[in-house]
Image (cartoon, rainbow, N blue to C red):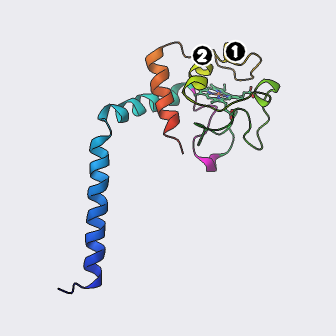
């Protein structure tokens, strides 16, 4: 049977959205919940200094869009402390966890004026949120 062209588009759209539906179901709901807890944490502890949309540029600290997996202290155009500028490695689970628990202990001399988020659950949710920023 020959279907009009738009029917194929509808079928493709339906297939696509059901694929999305499957993904949404597979993603443990707790992931989304953790991200939203982390986002809340971010709004109260970080957002006054860090933008999360690339287009928002710099506030006090470097823009954090895509921070997960990014090299430490290397975002072009941001004036880092010597500590972060010379730091090696990338922002991953371990480096973010240590830095957010105690910025000064993890990166002595960092210019980030934040004493640290000591609660393990809150920090882990916050990192889940940072991971979701692209
Ligand atoms: C009062 C302002 C301020 C607050 C609050 C703050 N930051 Fe920062 N942040 C900075 C500054 C300034 C730097 C750059 C530090 C340096 O150069 O040593 C920085 C650096 C960072 C970096 C390194 C980014 C890179 O490009 O290497 C991360 C990650 C980060 N902050 C995450 C956070 C998170 C998450 C929070 C909330 C828990 C937070 N910051 C709270 C000001 C702040």
The secondary structure type at the circle numbered 2 is: loop
Residue at the image position 25 percent from the left and 85 percent from the top: 4
The x, y position of residue 88, in whole percent, is 73, 29
In the image, residue 51 lies in the stretch drawn in magenta? yes
The quarter of the rendered structure image containing the C terminus is top right
The quarter of the rendered structure image containing the N terminus is bottom left
Q: Residue extending furthest left? A: 1
Which image quarter has ligand 1?
Answer: top right
The x, y position of residue 81, in whole percent, is 79, 27
The secondary structure type at the circle numbered 1 is: helix
Q: Residue extending furthest right? A: 82
Using a 10 Å C-alpha cutoff, classify the residue at mark 1 as few (fewer than 14 neighbours), some (14 to 19) or many (20 or more): some
Residue at the image position 30 percent from the left and 67 percent from the top: 13
In the image, residue 29 lies in the stretch drawn in magenta? no
Q: Which residue is mark 2?
A: 116
Residue at the image position 68 percent from the left and 36 percent from the top: 71
Residue 104's tag is 1
- From which residue to which does the magenta span run? 46-56
Label 1 CB sits under 8 Å from any ligand 1 atom: no
82 relative to 68, above or below: above
Asked whether the beta carbons under mark 2 and mark 1 sit within 8 Å of each other, the answer is: yes
**Quarter of the image where one finds residue 59:** top right
């Amino acid at each position: 049977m020959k279907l009009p062209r738009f029917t194929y588009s509808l079928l493709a759209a339906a297939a696509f959205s059901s694929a999305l539906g499957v993904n949404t179901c597979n993603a443990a709901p707790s992931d989304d919940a953790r991200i939203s807890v982390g986002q809340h944490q971010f709004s109260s502890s970080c957002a006054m200094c860090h933008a999360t949309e690339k287009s928002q540029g710099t506030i006090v600290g470097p823009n954090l869009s895509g921070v997960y997996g990014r090299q430490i202290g290397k975002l072009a155009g941001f004036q880092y402390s010597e500590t972060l500028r010379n730091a090696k490695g990338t922002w991953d689970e371990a480096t973010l966890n240590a830095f957010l628990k105690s910025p000064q202990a993890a990166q002595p001399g960092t210019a980030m004026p934040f004493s640290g988020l000591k609660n393990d659950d809150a920090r882990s949710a916050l990192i889940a949120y940072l991971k979701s920023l692209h």
